[in-house]
């Protein structure tokens, strides 16, 4: 048996990769409008960075990490997410200084690694597009962040989305709520799933997030965190809602929505898709929230210790587009195809192809010494707008045949004339 890629990974091949490039370019264009700037951090980090950031009782840290000791004895992990690495980088590079953008507005695009049970839209190497805005506790930042994600899906042509928000308040609110939740869940302990039994005491809020059907029923009547918000948290959440209302953004509130990472407080949100192609299944395609406190956790300055961010799955964005029947451009079209006939024309065929490329056109040729008919078939398949033909006779007469594929007209032009004015001649034909 031949070699196979590791479970939960993908080869993104031509025909498919264009979708990725397209989605990435849409993200870049949207984020540019928001003054968000790309950051590229390493694919692996010291394990400590992730534990500090994500929390040591989360699924990500306890079950899903690709960690190892490197040859120098350092405990390293492939990054499972990019908020902690970004905050690490923000503090390490002192991006809070007066010469820097404040708040710091960053985005990233890249692979993340989690040891999960692979299924549709769930991989071990997957890709996230994410935004982090660090240094402001203005609720407008939360709303702007959410809007940038909604804009992204809108630009992709994804329409069946639903925005869900909640507030987790401050750590103090959560501590009080935590106890209320434990009090509610404890009498039902025996009915909880194995995972939730374990979570009940080290991370009870995670029980609310359980995907187990029985857990979901139990959790339905759990107390609401929104009843435990202190004054600042309640005001903050009201302000977020008022801003969303003011901008005419539709949303739902789900008081049971918590996130899988420990660093969140105040606003959390998810964007869900109920695309027709999902046949009623609802999937989270984007998730994030506010993480005041994380900058300080990384020894950054208290003055810049307020932040908001989110991450969305690239695979899930593409699956969602497909489920909504959005056309994704995957063109392999060329402008100029050069038909070279006979082995002696190999050099001139290459020269013509290069001349086309140098003049700014997408150009392709035959490399297999195929017959004219087969080469024209390739040209048609690639929707070539112009076909140049050079055979042994043409070469001897120092000419090339130039065919306008739209008008189906062919003319002979001398090679010297052609090379002198390549861009003009081809450009005119393509312009029609
Ligand atoms: P889930 O509840 O689906 O496991 P999560 O809470 O672990 O998601 P986050 O860590 O918040 O997800 O990541 C944000 C987004 O990244 C998700 O909404 C999803 O689009 C994507 N994502 C997360 N894990 C995976 C994965 N293993 N494969 C593909 N996409 C993923
Ligand atoms: Mg997960």
Image (cartoon, grey):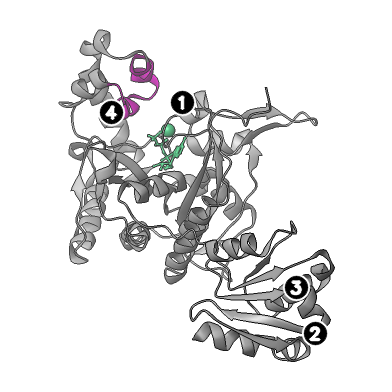
Q: Are marks 4 and 1 in contact (CB under 8 Å)?
A: no
* Dot label at residue 228: none
Q: Nearer the viewer, residue 379 or 60?
A: 379
How crowded is the residue under tag 1: few (<14 C-alpha within 10 Å), some, or many (20+)?
A: some
Work out whether mark 3 precedes mark 2 in sequence or the reverse, and give the earlier one. 3
Q: Residue at x 27, y 24 (%)?
A: 179
In this view of the protein, can residue 167 be seen by the observer?
A: no
Ligand 2 resides in the quarter of the picture at top left
The answer to which quarter of the image holds residue 367 is bottom right
Label 3 element class: loop
Q: Nearer the viewer, mark 4 or mark 1?
A: 4
Q: Which residues are magenta?
A: 195-212
* Dot label at residue 391: 3
How crowded is the residue under tag 4: few (<14 C-alpha within 10 Å), some, or many (20+)?
A: many
The answer to which quarter of the image holds residue 136 is bottom left
Q: CA distance from mark 2 to mark 4?
A: 77 Å
Q: CA distance from mark 1 to mark 3?
A: 71 Å
State whether residue 56 is above or below residue 331. above
Q: Nearer the viewer, mark 1 or mark 2?
A: 2
Work out whether mark 2 precedes mark 4 in sequence or the reverse, and give the earlier one. 4
């Amino acid at each position: 048996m031949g070699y196979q890629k590791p479970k939960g990974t993908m080869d993104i091949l031509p025909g498919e990769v264009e979708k990725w490039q397209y989605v990435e370019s849409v993200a870049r264009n949207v984020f540019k409008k928001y003054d968000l700037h790309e950051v590229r951090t390493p694919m692996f980090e010291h394990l400590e960075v992730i534990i500090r950031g994500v929390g040591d009782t989360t699924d990500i840290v306890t079950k899903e990490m690709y960690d190892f000791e490197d040859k120098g004895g350092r405990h390293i992990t492939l990054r499972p997410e990019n908020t902690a690495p970004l905050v690490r980088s923000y503090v390490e590079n002192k991006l809070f200084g007066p010469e820097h953008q404040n708040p710091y507005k960053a985005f990233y695009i890249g692979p993340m690694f989690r040891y999960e049970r692979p299924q549709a839209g769930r991989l071990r190497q997957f890709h996230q597009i994410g935004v982090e805005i660090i240094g402001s506790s203005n609720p407008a930042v939360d709303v702007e962040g959410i809007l940038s994600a909604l804009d992204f899906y809108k630009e992709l042509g994804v329409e069946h989305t639903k925005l869900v928000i909640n507030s987790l308040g401050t750590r103090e609110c959560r501590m009080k709520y935590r106890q209320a939740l434990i009090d509610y869940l404890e009498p039902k302990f025996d009915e909880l799933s194995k995972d939730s039994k374990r979570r009940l005491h080290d991370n009870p809020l995670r029980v609310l997030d359980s995907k187990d059907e029985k857990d979901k029923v139990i959790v339905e009547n759990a107390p609401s965190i929104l009843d435990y918000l202190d004054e600042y948290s309640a005001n903050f959440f009201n302000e977020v809602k008022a801003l969303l209302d003011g901008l005419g953004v539709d949303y739902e509130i789900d008081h049971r929505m918590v996130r899988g990472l420990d660093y969140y407080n105040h606003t959390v949100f998810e964007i869900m898709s109920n695309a027709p192609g999902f046949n009623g299944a609802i999937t989270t395609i984007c998730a994030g929230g506010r993480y005041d406190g994380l900058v300080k956790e990384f020894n950054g300055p208290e003055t810049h210790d307020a932040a908001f961010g989110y991450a969305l799955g690239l695979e899930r964005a593409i699956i969602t587009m497909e489920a909504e029947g959005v056309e994704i451009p995957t063109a392999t079209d060329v402008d100029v195809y050069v038909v070279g006939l006979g082995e002696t024309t190999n050099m001139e065929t290459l020269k013509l192809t290069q001349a086309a490329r140098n003049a700014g056109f997408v150009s392709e040729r035959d490399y297999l010494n195929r017959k004219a008919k087969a080469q024209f078939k390739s040209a048609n398949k690639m929707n070539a707008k112009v076909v140049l033909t050079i055979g042994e006779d043409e070469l001897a007469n120092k000419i090339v045949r130039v065919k306008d594929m739209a008008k189906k007209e062919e003319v002979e032009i001398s090679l010297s004339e052609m090379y002198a004015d390549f861009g003009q001649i081809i450009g005119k034909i393509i312009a029609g």
